Amino acid sequence: MGLPTRPRHPYRWNMPVTIHSLDGARGVLVRGWGRVDDADFLAAHRAHFASDPEFLSLQWYAIANWSGLLETDISPESLKAVAQLCLAATRVSPHLLLAMVGREDLPYGLSRMFEVLAEDTGWAIQSFRDEPGARKWIQEQIADRYGREVAFRKDPVAIWEPAGST
């Protein structure tokens, strides 16, 4: 099975988002910036979780870095909907590590709220103020769980890049 070159969905959203596979599909890096609303937030997550289940099953960790958000009105209902998508993904990825990054108070607070809403996944979820802290936590967790190291190397193709971003 090869890495997907593009997701199989029709979504395009205004918020700049890139989703890259890392370390031979063992990890995922999601970066978002600009303005995001409920529709943007839900579309991005639905697109990600529409990936091939076999591909999702390879993942040990994910970093969602929302430090570049300038403004947002993501509702608690949208956070709950994404938590439900994550719960469904536990069928193929039951032991995921999820590190969420938000430098500013709003994205950090949304990340903390999501931790509570996604408790039923059983995933290890932590919120951080910076990406180096998130990466350190993931490295420690992967070493403890699998006795392996992660390098956070981007794989050759993106899982998702909006049209015109390359």
Image: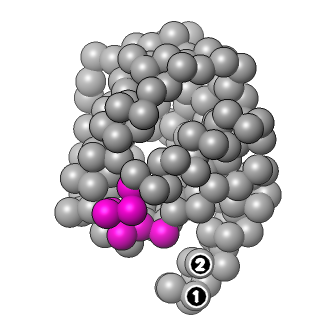
Residue marked by disc 2:
141
Q: Is residue 52 left or right of residue 14?
A: left
Q: Nearer the viewer, residue 120 or 30?
A: 120
56 to 37, vertically: above or below = below
Please tell me whether mark 2 sits on a helix, a strand or a loop. helix
Residue for point 59% across, 61% down: 126
Q: Please say if the residues under marks 1 and 2 sit with CB atoms less than 8 Å apart.
A: yes
- The stretch of residues the image draws in magenta is 118-124
Question: Residue 164 lies in magenta, yes or no?
Answer: no
Residue for point 63% across, 43% down: 109
CA gap, disc 1 to disc 2? 5 Å
14 to 66, vertically: above or below = above
Residue marked by disc 1:
144
129 to 71, vertically: above or below = below
Q: Amino acid at mark 2?
A: Gln
Q: Nearer the viewer, residue 16 or 153?
A: 16
